[in-house]
Image (cartoon, rainbow, N blue to C red):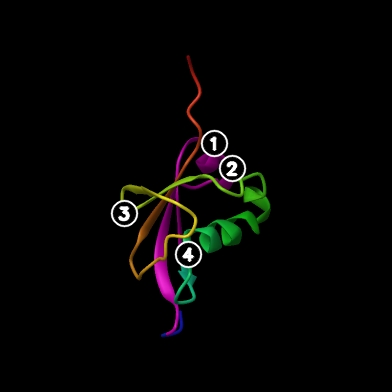
Amino acid sequence: MTPAEVPVRVLLFGRYRELAGTGEIRLEVPPGSRVRDVVGLLRARPALQALPADPAVAVNRRYEGPDRALAAGDEVALIPPVAGG
């Protein structure tokens, strides 16, 4: 990690966890990165290409949109759709 990078922790649940083969991924992103940038980095991984372009996301346990800016140490959780009825 270079001094210009911002560390974030990505948590994956349900189907997303199954696709990734892990429940947590640590990333270093450029300053000014947003939720959509993290999703793009994840979708670039072969195992996560099936990840939707705009999944439900929580940052530090609050639902957020794709334009939410990220800070060092943020926790980004990707939440799959809930099925049932």
Q: Is residue 41 left or right of residue 23?
A: right
Q: What residue would you read off at disc 1?
A: 15
Q: Name the element at disc 4.
A: loop
User: Which residue type does callout 4 highlight?
Assistant: Arg
Marks 4 & 3, CB-CB < 8 Å contact: no
The region drawn magenta spans 4-27
In percent of width and height, residue 27 lies at 47, 65
Q: Name the element at disc 3.
A: loop
Disc 4 packing (10 Å; few <14; some 14–19; many ≥20) = some
| CA distance separating discs 4 and 1 | 23 Å
Q: Is residue 62 magenta?
A: no
- Residue, x 47% and y 64% (percent of image)? 34
Q: What residue would you read off at disc 4?
A: 34
Quadrant of the rendered image containing residue 68:
bottom left
Marks 3 & 1, CB-CB < 8 Å contact: no
In percent of width and height, residue 5 lies at 45, 78
Q: Name the element at disc 2.
A: helix
Specify which label sits upstream in the sequence, 4 or 3. 4
